[in-house]
Image (tube, helix red, strand yellow):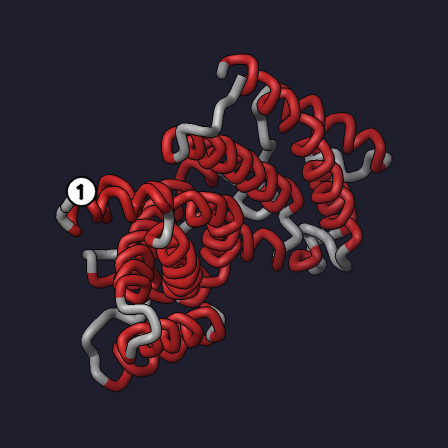
Amino acid sequence: MLAYAVKRALGAIPTLFILLTLAFFLIRLAPGGPFDAERQLPPEIEANLNQKYHLDEPLYQQYGRYLWDIARGDFGPSFQYRDLTVNQLIADGFPVSLRLGLMSLLFALFFGVMLGTLAALRQNSAADYGLMTVAMLGVSIPNYVLAPLMILVFAVYQGWLPAGGLGGWQNYVMPVLALGTAMMAYIARLTRGSMIEVLRSNFIRTARAKGLPLRLLLFRHALPAAMVPVVSFLGPATAGIITGSVVIETIFGIPGLGRYFVQGALNRDYTLVMGVVLFYGMLIIVFNFIVDLLYAWLDPRVKYA
C-alpha cells in the first residue's frame, strides 16, 4: 500500500505541472489585464504597478518566477485584493466551499443510495418508474437553471428561505439542493442498476436460502457490493461539485473559493485564478486517491501491492 501511495503521489506531479502551465498561459491569452480598470491612473503609476508585480518582465521569466514560488508553497499576491495574498484568500474561502461541498455530497449520497435501493427492490413497478423519472429530471436540469428557479419560488414568491449570503442553516438549503440534485440523480440510477445485479448474484441467493433477514441481507451483503460503481463515480462527481460550486456560490452570493475564482477571472487577477485552479486540482487528485483506497475496503478482491 505504501508503494502504491508513493507511486500515485509521484504521478500527480506531472499532472499538476501541466495544469499549472495551462492555467498560467491561458489566463494571459484572455484580453485585458489586472489593472485595466485603473486606466485613469498616470502611465508612470501603472508602470510602477507592473514593475511591483513583475508584469513588465518577459513571459518566460514570469513563468519561472511563478514556478519557484509554487515550489515554496507561495501562490503569490493578489492583484485585486491588494492587502491579501492568494494563500490568505484560499484559507478564507475554502472552509466555506468545503462545508457546502460536503453537505451537498452527503445529501446526494444518502438520498441517491436510498432512492436507488428502493427502485431496485421494486423493479419495474410504478414506484421504480416514478423514482427513475425524477432522477432523469435531476440529471437533465443544470444547477445554474435550478438555482435561480429555487430563488424565485422559495425566496421571492414564498419567502421561506433567504435568497443568498451566509447566516444560519437556512442559507445552505437552496445551495445544497441546487448543487447536489444532479449528483443525487446519477447516484440513484447507478445504485439501482448495480443493486439489481447484486441481488441476482449467487451469494445473495444463498443468504436468502439460509433465511437471512432482509435488513441484514441489504446492509451487510448487497449494499457494500453495489457501492463499487457509486464509489467509481465519486471521482468525477467531486470534480462536478467543485466546478458547480463556482456557479452556485456566485448565484447565491456565498463568499467561498468559487466566488473568488469568478471575480479573479473577471478582474484578470492572474495569481488568484492560477492559485485556485492548482488548489482545486490537488483536491481532485487527493479525493481520487481516497476513492481508489475505498475499492479495497468495499471489494476484498481488490488488492494494492
Q: Tell how many labels.
A: 1
**Residue 85 visible to an observer of this rendering:** no
What element does badge 1 sit on?
loop
Residue in front for this viewpoint, 242 or 305: 305
Tell me: 176 left or right of 303.
Answer: left
| Residue occupying the point 32% across, 63% down | 120
Tell me: 123 left or right of 250.
Answer: left
- Against 114, residue 299 (above or below) is above
Residue in front for this viewpoint, 181 or 32: 181
| Residue occupying the point 27% across, 63% down | 121
Q: Position of residue 263 (x, y in %)?
A: 55, 56
Tell me: 258 left or right of 97.
Answer: right
Q: Position of residue 164 (x, y in %)?
A: 32, 66
Under mark 1, the amino acid is Lys
Give the farthest residue toward the top. Answer: 2
**Residue 206 visible to an observer of this rendering:** yes
Residue in front for this viewpoint, 137 or 105: 137
Give the farthest residue toward the bottom. Answer: 157
Q: Which residue is identified by label 1?
A: 210
Tell me: 167 left or right of 177.
Answer: left
In the rendered image, the quadrant that contains the C terminus is: top right
| Residue occupying the point 65% across, 25% down | 11
- Against 107, residue 251 (above or below) is below
- Against 135, residue 68 (above or below) is above
Q: Position of residue 63 (x, y in %)?
A: 77, 32
Quadrant in the rendering for residue 231? top left
